[in-house]
Image (cartoon, grey):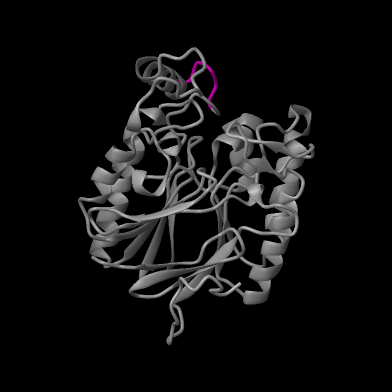
Amino acid sequence: MGSGNGIVSANFKNPLLSFGVISDVQYADIPDGRSFRGVPRYYRHSVLVLQRAVQKWNQQKHNFVLNFGDIVDGFCPRNQSLTAVKKLVDEFDRFEGPVYHMIGNHCLYNLPRDNLLPLLRVPGYGGYAYYDFSPIPEFRFVILDCYDISAIGWPKDHPNTLKALKLLSEKNPNLDKNSPDGLVGLERRFLMFNGAVGNEQLEWLDRVLQEATKANQKVIICCHLPLDPGASSNEALLWNYNEVMDVIYRYNCVKVCIAGHDHKGGHSIDSHGIHHRVLEAALECPPGTDAFGYIDVFDDKLSLFGTDRMKSTDMIFSR
């Protein structure tokens, strides 16, 4: 691991904590394929990437692991979905410490929320998958549920499904709601495989950030969908990323937002000095290569040390 690409600078002090990261494993027991853009996908190899990641994380003795969603691919045969999710959860459970999961669109293609969330041991409530935790007093991690308002995962007659379908009908005129044809610029995010954060979750986020500010905590926002166009393709963004960022901008406690979903990865610093890091996908690693890493947490920055396809990145706090 380490900083083989030379991006991460030398650290002369011990981190406050460290944690493993991986995103978009998208395992399926099917032959290799390609994305709709023609990018190769290695469905069976991705679990080997996860296995190597867990082995490395245990050797390095990190405090916990964050999985940024999509552990099983949408092409996984539905009669194998439950078995595949359990298989991947078992692999994560080989890590000798806590594992915190996020849900992604591919997870929800395979299993409905009421089946998925207990398997992932997501500590949300009422079928929602947002929560927060503080591994040390100085930092708080906030996990968002990007498919709160979504056309996938909820029952067809659920209010959140109906809200999502209404929004898609207003924003995307295509018969195939996963097609961005004819959509321009940021409007290209209104695709069925994305979603939104609902009003109740936005209010919860505001309360959490108020509490963190009072406690003088630095906050790391984690979610499957990216929150900044500078770090992601338009087609991968949270539908209401701007509303989420409006809440975040009310406070000075948020330092970094980390996401998955956009497999090529990315990094940006927004107009308020917040880093946005989108993680490269484990699914797109050719056999023998990897995409996982770990993050060292300091009082003034996060340092991501990646393997192979996952780029190492220093994220120095600027506010």
Q: Main secondary structure of the magenta part?
A: loop
Residue 209 placed where, x, y %? 29, 54
221 or 40, which lies in front?
Answer: 40
Task: Please give the name of the residue rendered at 37% of the width and 32% of the height, measured from the top-left corner.
Answer: 239
On the rendered image, what quadrant is the N terminus found in? bottom right
Horizontally, residue 125 falls left or right of residue 93, namely: left
Q: Is residue 103 left or right of residue 210?
A: right
- 274 is within the stretch colored magenta: no
Can residue 220 be seen in this snapshot? yes
Residue at the image position 74 percent from the left and 28 percent from the top = 78
**Front-most of residues 184 and 278:** 184
**Which residue occupies the foreground of this view, 28 or 289?**
289
Q: Residue at x 53, y 74 (%)?
A: 3
Q: Which residues are magenta?
A: 154-158
Residue 98: x, y in percent?
59, 62
- Mark yes or no: residue 111 visible: no
Which quadrant is home to the C terminus?
bottom left
Q: Position of residue 64 (x, y in %)?
A: 56, 65
Q: Is residue 248 above or below residue 57?
A: above
Please say whether residue 157 is one of the residues in the magenta stretch.
yes
283 up-or-down from 273: above or below: above
